[in-house]
Structures are given as C-alpha cells and as structure tokens.
Image (cartoon, grey):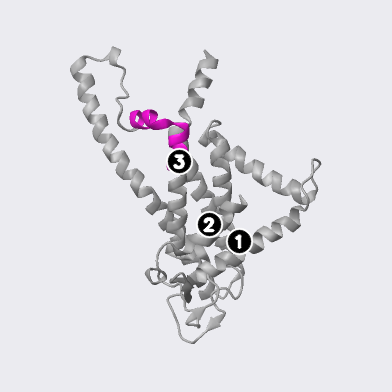
Amino acid sequence: MRFSFFLLAFFSPTLLFASESPAPSSLSDQFFGLPITNTLFTGWVVAILFLVGLRIFVGKVKMIPGRGQAVLESAVTSLRDLWEPIVGKKAMPFAFPILVTLFFFILIQNWTGLIPGVGTIGWGTGSNPLNVHVETPLFRPPTSDFNGTIALAAFSFLAWILIILKYAGPKVILLDWFGNKADKKELAAPMYWALSVIFLLVGVIEIVSILIRPVTLSVRLFGNVFGGEGLMHATSYSLPFYFMELLVGFVQALVFTLLSAVYIGLLCNHGDHDEEEAHAH
C-alpha cells in the first residue's frame, strides 16, 4: 500500500501539463523539464503526512492490536467486506490493495480542500474562477485538478486490465463481450446465428462503453471536488457546507472505488458464482 500511495501522490496530478487544467498553477519547471504544480506539491505533502501520521497512530503492529491498530483493521475489514462480494474471492487478494490505496488516497486528497489556507495562501494578487485572491496558491487539492483525476482513472483502468487478464483470461473476456449468450440446443440454427451477429454488435458497443469509463470516473470526481472547493471559498468555510463537503469527499472516494470494483467483478466474479451454484446442486 505504501508504494502504491507514493506512486499515486507522485504522478497523479501531472500526467498532463498544468496549463490544461482550469486552475492549478506551476510552482517550478525544474523537475525534468516538467512543471511542479501546486496540486502535485500538495499531493506529495499530504501523502507523506498521512503515512507518517498513520504510522504514529497505529504504532508497532502486534498480534493483540492496540487501539490505533484496531481502528485501522476495523476500517480495512469493513472495506474488504464491502468489495469482496463485488470483485469475487478469486481476484480479491490482488484487487484489494489497489482498491484500498485508491480509496484512502482519494479520500484524504478530497478533504485537503477543507483545510483553511488551502487555495488561499500563496503570492500575487488577483482573482481566478474560485474567487481566490492570490494568483498562485501554494496548496490546492490534487483531485480538484483534472490532470489528477484523469491519472487516478488511468491507474484504475490499467489495474482493471491487469486483473481481468490474470483472473478471467482472454477467452472468458472475449466470450463475455462477443459470445452468444443463447443456448444452442434450445434455438433453431438460423435464429442462433442471427443472435450471434447481434451479440457481436453488442460487444462493439460494450468496448466503446469500456473506453469511456476512465472519462466518466475522472469527470465525476473532478466536478464534485472542484465545485466543492469553489463553494467553500464562496461561503468562507460556512459550517453546514463544511460538513456537507466532508460527506461529499467520502462519498466520491467510495463511489470511485465501488465502480472500479464493479468493473473488475463483471468479468472476474463469474467463477465464484459458478462454484456456488455447483455446491448448491
């Protein structure tokens, strides 16, 4: 989880150039010729602080857990119980570290924008679409940067490809997308082959919908966090909206990982259901 966490923190806000996002500012151009944006810098700082704080909170891992370890284990177990029926027992050992890393990373980065000073401490004067009276904020939530959410969606999509190839396999994938779902024994040959053509066309539509998934994942997360950031600044961190954004940040992290789990389970959970049906008979 630690390696994945640093990987996300390092790359997620800068898969694209900073100028392509509505609001992030470049703090430096010295990192291999690429800009170090305020969203990237915030992602680094928050990820390091989170991991250090988590280490202090949990302490030394013991067989009989202390209070901090018990709280963390309870949270992780709850997430596992939520995702396992969706992903399937076969793929869960590989998928779980990825899903839990994505969840906690997105959650804390979503909540970064609720810290007073984030988006308002910086240099220069002026205004931007968020009505922040600094030209270059030092800190901004990584998930309020469209580059960051695109990178998170790309990370999820790449993990999905690796998992389905490993635990479903090309044969199952092709049959699921393009295979005829009808029973050949129950249909006349002309009807069966006509349905084969239809299922082939449905498979093409399914491929298009799959390619759109990273876009929908990234836009949903970006829109909610970016809009919430603007709302918080416009209302001067009003308490009701503050608690609403706490909830929105949690829900968006949960939705992102639940959808990622569903995409995996659509292909990798067939075997578990087949085994359960066999045991039932």
Alpha-carbon span between mark 3 and mark 1: 25 Å
SS label for mark 3? helix
Lower position in the chain sequence, tag 2 or tag 3: 2
The tag on residue 134 is none
Which amino acid lies under the numbered mark 3 shown in the image of this protein? Leu
From the viewer's perspective, tell me whether residue 192 is left or right of residue 2.
left
Residue 247 spot, x, y in % from top left? 58, 57
- The residue identified by callout 1 is 47
Give the mark toward the camera: 3 or 1: 3
Relative to 16, does residue 96 appear above or below in the rendering?
Answer: above
Q: Is residue 82 visible?
A: yes
- Residue range (magenta): 161-176
Q: Residue at x 58, y 63 (%)?
A: 111
In the displayed structure, does residue 65 sit left or right of residue 188? right
- In the picture of the structure, the residue carrying the numbered disc 2 is 8
Q: Main secondary structure of the magenta part?
A: helix
Mark 2, other Cα within 10 Å: few <14 / some 14–19 / many ≥20: many
**Residue 162 in picture, x, y percent from top left:** 45, 41
- Which residue is located at x 44 percent, y 47 percent? 158
Horizontal side, residue 177 vs residue 276: left or right: left
What amino acid is labelled 1 in the image?
Answer: Ala
* Residue 42 spot, x, y in % from top left: 56, 68
Answer above or below: position of 165 versus 54: above
Q: Residue at x 45, y 42 (%)?
A: 160
Disc marking residue 162: 3
Quadrant in which residue 74 is drawn: top right
The answer to whether 143 appears left or right of 74 in the picture is left
Which amino acid is tagged 2?
Leu
| Kind of element beneath mark 2 | helix
